[in-house]
Image (spheres, grey):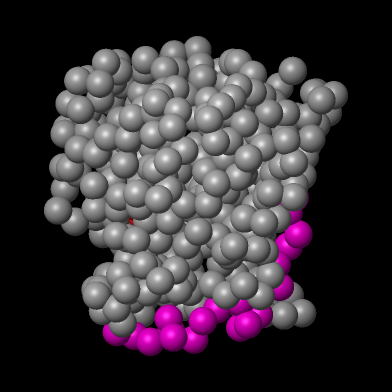
Amino acid sequence: MIVNSWNEWDPLRHVIVGKADNCHIPPPEPALDAKVPEDSDMKGSWGKRSPETISRANELLDNFTKQLEGLGVKVDRPIPIDFSEPVKTPDFQTQSQFGCMPPRDVLLTLGSEILEATMSYRCRWFEYLCYRPLLQKYWELDKNFRHEAAPKPRLTDDDYHPDYLSEKIGESKRLEWAAEKFFVTTEEEPLFDAADILRFGKDLVVQHGFTTNLKGIEWLRRHFRDHRIHTVNFPGDPYPIHIDATFTPLRPGLVLNNPNRRLPDEQRKLFNNNDWEIVDAAQPAHNAPPPLCYSSTWLSMNVLVLDPKTVCVEKSEVYQAEQMDKLGMNVIEVDLRAAYAFGGGLHCCTADVFREGGCQDYFPNQ
Ligand code: DAV
């Protein structure tokens, strides 16, 4: 058996770690523009990232790979495609692609299945190709492995609300829209990124936001028929993409929640009714993200759990590491900050292949 993983915390044995090769800052497009912070140094500039930053990021990703291997975790790496190539379909075109540093965004592993997400950015439409050589290999070796792909979206302009195209929306307007669940993506067709989904065995928790719409969540519900799908949203986040800098399960019964993006009371019942504790995450160690970075400083909580007692935390995130220690976790420090700009933190740059354990029901009281 090669592929098996039902949650975010059972002992990790096999994982994919991304690569920074050839990574591009993609040209403007609706969903991406909505996510780039208004004061970002990336506004108006696009093209291949500098060779120095790419090799530094790769050095860190290679070191992380060696660290994991030293801990007995098997690591596979993607085969990057040429991201300078434009993407053209009958419905849209864009001048370059992105990269393959964050496999977590593209691949959702659940049990013996790996599902390729629809994605919601045009520049990420072909990113799955970087993982196909690995998935093909797993398919040959593992008779139980189910390789699935969600319907490729058309990503016409009908997929995006034009209101989000404005240059200056402002943080308070954004927070208002997020609270109303008015996001950049429309309900034209099912859309989701795999990083909006957290796996809790029989239960899947999915963030409705910029990258995942309600039809995407409905598609997941009809696809994973033996699972219960819970839609969540975090009104405090002005740029809501991906759940993994907002809500971080560490072990059965314990989740960290970003204190600026608290899960609304109404949505806490599932956790409260089943004796799960939701604790505020520690503050990030930095006041600003590194240069040319899409993500917020809350990559501090974008950790990789190796087993219910062991967690990888980015080396500079001292407050997060201290909190993990108080919560009874052994911390493994990983230097990754100089790779953040390529697509995120320790959770983003990995995708599960194998964790021990089976599918359990952690929320019997629904
Ligand atoms: O807080 O910027 C980053 C998530 C990346 N997968 C944030 C979310």
Q: Is residue 62 above or below residue 339?
A: above
Q: Quadrant of the N terminus?
A: top right
Q: Is residue 332 above or below residue 293?
A: above
Q: Is residue 188 above or below residue 207?
A: below
Q: Residue shown at 55%/78% (left/top)?
A: 160
Q: Is residue 354 visible?
A: no
* Residue 163 magenta-highlighted: yes
Q: Position of residue 101 (x, y in %)?
A: 49, 47
The range drawn in magenta is 149-168
Q: Is residue 259 visible?
A: yes
Q: Quadrant of the C terminus?
A: top right
Place residue 156 in its image quadrant: bottom right
Q: Position of residue 8 (x, y in %)?
A: 49, 30
Could you say which is closer to the camera, residue 39 or residue 160? 160
Q: Is residue 207 left or right of residue 354?
A: left
Q: Is residue 338 left or right of residue 1?
A: left
Q: Is residue 90 left or right of residue 169?
A: right
Could you say which is closer to the camera, residue 16 or residue 156? 156
Q: Position of residue 310 (x, y in %)?
A: 36, 18
Q: Residue shown at 36%/23% (left/top)?
A: 311
Could you say which is closer to the camera, residue 61 or residue 267? 267
Q: Residue shown at 59%/16% (left/top)?
A: 356
Place residue 109 in its image quadrant: top right
How many discs appear?
0
Q: Residue shown at 46%/38% (left/top)?
A: 270
Tell me the chief SS of the magenta region.
loop
* Residue 300 magenta-highlighted: no
Q: Position of residue 292 (x, y in %)?
A: 31, 62
